[in-house]
Amino acid sequence: MQIAPLPRGGRPGAGGVGAQGAVDDVGEVSSEHAEGFESAATASSRPDRCPASPPTTGQSRWLNSPVALTPPDFDRLLVPGTRVGAASGSGTVAEPLRTELSLPSGEVVASEWRWEPIGFTEIAPPGRYPVLLHPLVLDGGETRAPIPLAVRLVIRDRPVASWTMALLPGQDPAELSEEGFYGFPVDGGEGSLIDAQYLRELHETGTYHEFVDTAKIDLGFGELLEPSEDEDGRQTVGFTIGCDGVYPTWIGHTADGDLACYVIDLLELDERT
């Protein structure tokens, strides 16, 4: 199955926003975490993919949905060859694109390019782990751009028995509305994964902005998944989303309760648990 490069979506060059924010009541925007970073919250609504002029508050993708956002059955739906329905249309899941990410502290940060050095509250064992981007080839579009469905950071390659929403310190799902969720805002069609320890080092050494600029160049125009590393071994993995919005991360656990993976949900899959 041939996969063509995905064009850069959203508003190229637009500045991203930082911390993970809450998607809550319609039209409301919440801000939290460190000064100088902005968190966006949006309604649980679902417009057309890549609207021509996405609002700065980033309307989310579930239009008039009366139910809370739940995770898809990623283990079943993201198997290559599986037929799925998505926001962009029906198609076939292709083989995932693969790279690796080093986590020296295990503090995972999922965001656009303006990072805070604050990872999710559930910490992975330090190590180097596979990162998979799962693309969808739309019906009749074998030579057209694939649609990214999800990005998975694999900690243990074992079946997932349960999913929980990834949280930052101070975030409490009980404070969300019935249809709310936490996610990171995107205003340039791209996202990334990085360890919080690397971010602290980059700020301390004054090389943060140079690192970000290089990572953006490494991702390049039309690339779907690309690692970037500086001369001191600090690494990030960038990926193309193709649309602006707010995107949740789910954490998968095995039947024994062990951390299995983090999955960035790009809110394409129609079928949810």
Image (spheres, rainbow, N blue to C red):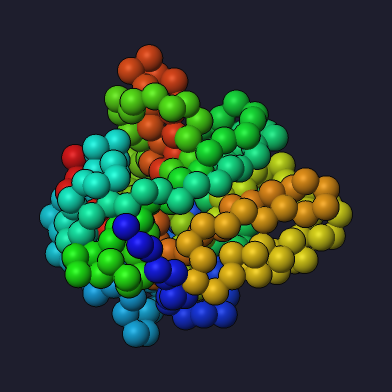
For residue 143, above or below residue 90: below
Residue 36 at x, y percent in the picture:
65, 65
Q: Quadrant of residue 250?
A: top left
Q: Quadrant of residue 65?
A: bottom left
Residue 231 at x, y percent in the picture:
83, 52
Image quadrant where one finds the C terminus: top left
For residue 123, above or below residue 37: above
In the image, 36 versus 204, the foreground residue is: 204
Would residue 87 be found to the left or right of residue 207 on screen?
left
In the image, 85 versus 80, the foreground residue is: 80
In the image, 16 versus 90, the foreground residue is: 90
In the image, 186 versus 173, the foreground residue is: 186
For residue 116, above or below residue 56: above
Q: Residue furthest bottom?
A: 52
Q: How many numbered discs?
A: 0
Residue 41 in view of the camera: no
Would residue 105 be found to the left or right of residue 66 on screen?
right
Image quadrant where one finds the N terminus: bottom left
Residue shown at 44%/69% (left/top)? Answer: 5
Residue shown at 43%/64% (left/top)? Answer: 241
Residue 104 at x, y percent in the picture:
70, 35
Residue 237 at x, y percent in the picture:
59, 52
